[in-house]
Amino acid sequence: MSPMARTAPVPAATDPAIIRNFCIIAHIDHGKSTLADRMLQLTGVVQPRDMKAQYLDRMDIERERGITIKSQAVRMPWELDGSSYALNMIDTPGHVDFTYEVSRSLAACEGAVLLVDAAQGIEAQTLANLYLAMENNLTIIPVLNKIDLPAAQPERYAAELASLIGGDPEDVLRVSGKTGMGVEALLDKIVRDLPAPVGDPDAPARAMIFDSVYDTYRGVVTYVRVVDGMLHPRERIQMMSTRATHELLEIGVSSPEPTPSKGLGVGEVGYLITGVKDVRLSKVGDTVTNMAKPAADSLPGYADAKPMVFSGLYPLDGTDYPVLRDALEKLMLNDAALVYEPETSAALGFGFRVGFLGLLHLEITRERLEREYNLDLISTAPNVEYEVTLEDKKVVHVTNPSEYPSGKIAEVREPMVAATILAPNEFVGAIMELCQSRRGVMGGMDYLSEDRVEIRYRLPLAEIVFDFFDILKSKTRGYGSLDWKADGEQVADLVKVDIMLQGEQVDAFSAITHRDKAYAYGVMMTTKLRELIPRQQFEVPIQAAIGSRIIARESIRAIRKDVLAKCYGGDISRKRKLLEKQKEGKKRMKMVGTVEVPQEAFIAALTTDESKDKAKKK
């Protein structure tokens, strides 16, 4: 039977027994979006003339990088044994920064397709998402993708997958998202194996928000999964965490373009439009209920997205500050996880201190600001939030080295993460060496197969946000993969290293670092600045200091003006007199002169070697 013959229109008011809610979980680049494309084609919801690669990835950056940043939901019809079914697929982000979005998407489903690349095997993010799915008691369907690749090893990785989740290697489906091979069998298995959603149709309405996006014309579009009761257009709804009430202007399903309906019942996945203009009023994980007949309890699992990494964003041209402020406001409409506040730097001028979920979130936000709003930005080195307790028991939260208190400090607490690293066993020594150099404490090690090992470490977040992943990739020749999650705090011996030019502190170059690494940071920064700052008419000392103690120093030598050029012949006393005169002038200049630091020096000193390489390639 042809694929088109097996698709059927889905009834408007859907019986929960014919609904199947599932998501696809996988590591980055294991073919999740390509498999979703084939499903859209096979079920006939996207016509061949409208089809494009990565259909559900709507942002340019998602398409260019080949990653999913925002969750997407789509309803697909499918026919099996003469019955029509409605399949709701929720496409989830694969990156560690967006784990909270993934967890909410999983909570909206009854089953998950665990997708593994047949050429690469299980990666750290695959495991992390699998454990999340197991915590939500989802039915797991193991699938090997990309079996058409010459490097595919389906037998080996099927055995690995089967041993991980329990079962036989024969139960692992083999598909190719590129060619469409095996996708029909996967859709059949989803219908047969996944349970239908369960809920009380007569109870007060309760729907969980698993995503919300901002539409320029219609305001916030909120994606929900209805758990109990029913939602109808034109009724008033309430968000249970914020108690905000709105009128439901439109309700419908995505198939994959928005299609208005007469309401959403138990188990259905769809969208709501209320005309609200701020995504923060439709928070992911919140519960939507009917205002006239509200539910007593909200659905479990709601949490505010917490920024993990902070970085200062400054426009290269000071006149762009209002543009940057407007751009951040508009981005916040689309990204509820973004947090920012204005800050000023003596060196960089006016800018914003912005909180991100992780480094990828930082990189994508910065790229969107530069591309969509035509801005040139400097971002300061990423920092994490420290909790500093002073001797008088006052607690200060520090997100920026300039906020670090100068009084007597009782203790400093830093955020920790539980990291899981997967790699071939030949790289175990190199990984352990890297983690120990970053103050990591080993938590355990398990062999997933003869030659693949899972290593668990507890590491300070500050040690992994900068270049940890890049070094891990180079040490494991690209085979290592990393996943991490927040794991409390611990007391650490941290100090603030100040960089001073001509005795004056330059706040942009200051850093909070562990006492053991303070000297290395001071030497690295002073050496870098000596090369970057042009020579002046007088000698300029560059110093690194902890409090009042200097730990490293470099000097930029003065340009010697040849005052003897016009003094040829004559005795030595005349030459000496001219040199003394020059010396007096330089002394006076040193007292009144300030050091000019060119913009390029700030950019070069605050960017890593990796981002410099990217800039060269551009």
Image: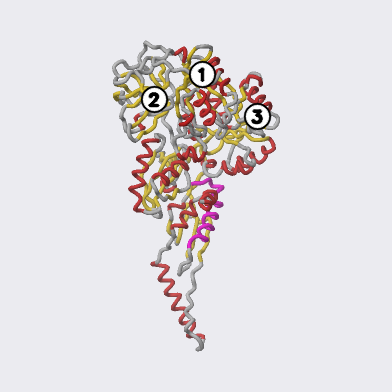
The image's mark for residue 137 is: none
Mark 1 vs mark 3, CA separation in Å: 47 Å
Q: Which residue is mark 1?
A: 5
Relative placement, left or right, of 471 versus 67 is right
Tell me how far mark 1 sits from mark 2, CA to CA: 39 Å
Residue occupied by mark 2 = 286
**Label 1 neighbourhood size at 10 Å, few (<14), some (14-19), many (20+)?**
few
Q: Which numbered disc, 3 or 2, marks the residue that appears first in the sequence? A: 2
| Pointer 3 with pointer 2, Cβ within 8 A | no
Q: Main secondary structure of the magenta part?
A: helix
Q: Position of residue 438 (x, y in %)?
A: 58, 42
Q: Position of residue 100 (x, y in %)?
A: 47, 30
Secondary element under disc 3, as helix, strand or loop, is: strand
Residue range in magenta is 512-533
**Amino acid type, mark 2:** Asp
**Residue type at numbered disc 3:** Asp
Residue that badge 3 annotates? 446
Asked where in the image residue 200 lies, by quadrant, the reply is top left
Q: Residues within 10 Å of mark 3 (few under 14, many from 20)?
A: few
Magenta stretch contains residue 426: no
**Which one is earlier in the sequence, the residue at label 1 or at label 2?**
1
Q: Nearer the viewer, residue 334 or 410?
A: 334
Q: Quadrant of residue 459?
A: top right
Where is residue 445 shown, x and y percent of the image?
A: 64, 31
Q: Nearer the viewer, mark 3 or mark 2?
A: 2
The CA span between labels 3 and 2 is: 37 Å
Q: Residue at x 59, y 36 (%)?
A: 481
Secondary element at image label 2: loop
**Marked residue nearer the N-terminal end (1 or 3):** 1
Residue 419, x across and y down, in percent? 56, 34
